Image (tube, rainbow, N blue to C red):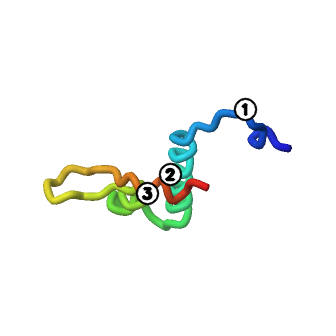
Amino acid sequence: MTRLDQPNDLVDAALRDEIVLVGDLVIAAAESDDHLPQSTIDQILGVEQPRRGRLTAVASRSSRHRT
């Protein structure tokens, strides 16, 4: 049994989601031959550009990585 399998361990879902997002950015950057455009970074992070011009996070983005 691994440490994470122990029943009394705490799991920080928000931290896990942030780690996944950073991992997604690292992978995209490693696969790119040039700097990532802001639009690509926003897409990876699940940020939408509403009509008013303000950026907002999409809540469903990080939930797809949960197991």
Kindly identify which numbered label has been placed on residue 58. Answer: none
**Dot 3: what SS?**
helix
Residue depth check, mark 2 versus mark 1: number of the one nearer the observer:
1
Closer to the N terminus: mark 3 or mark 1?
Answer: 1
For the point 14% across and 54% down, the residue is 52
Whether label 2 touches label 1, CB < 8 Å: no
Depth check: give the residue in front, 7 or 62: 7
Residue depth check, mark 3 versus mark 1: number of the one nearer the observer:
1
Closer to the N terminus: mark 2 or mark 1?
Answer: 1
Image quadrant holding the C terminus, namely bottom right
**Dot 2: what SS?**
helix
Tell me the CA gap for discs 2 and 3. Answer: 9 Å
Q: Provide residue 6's location: percent of width, then percent of height.
A: 78, 38
For the point 38% across and 52% down, the residue is 59
Please state if 55 lies on the left or on the right of 14 as rendered.
left
Q: What residue type is labelled 3?
A: Arg
> Which residue is denoted by mark 1 in the rendering?
8
Quick one: which residue is furthest to the left in this view?
52
Q: Provide residue 8's location: percent of width, then percent of height.
A: 72, 32
Residue depth check, mark 2 versus mark 3: number of the one nearer the observer:
3
**Dot 1: what SS?**
loop
Q: Provide residue 32's location: percent of width, then percent of height.
A: 49, 66
> Which residue is denoted by mark 2 in the rendering?
21
> Which residue is denoted by mark 3 in the rendering?
61
Crowding near the residue tagged with mark 3, few <14, some 14–19, many ≥20 C-alpha atoms within 10 Å? some
For the point 28% across and 50% down, the residue is 56
Please state if 31 lies on the left or on the right of 49 as rendered.
right
Tell me the CA gap for discs 2 and 1. Answer: 26 Å
Q: Which amino acid does label 2 sit on?
A: Leu
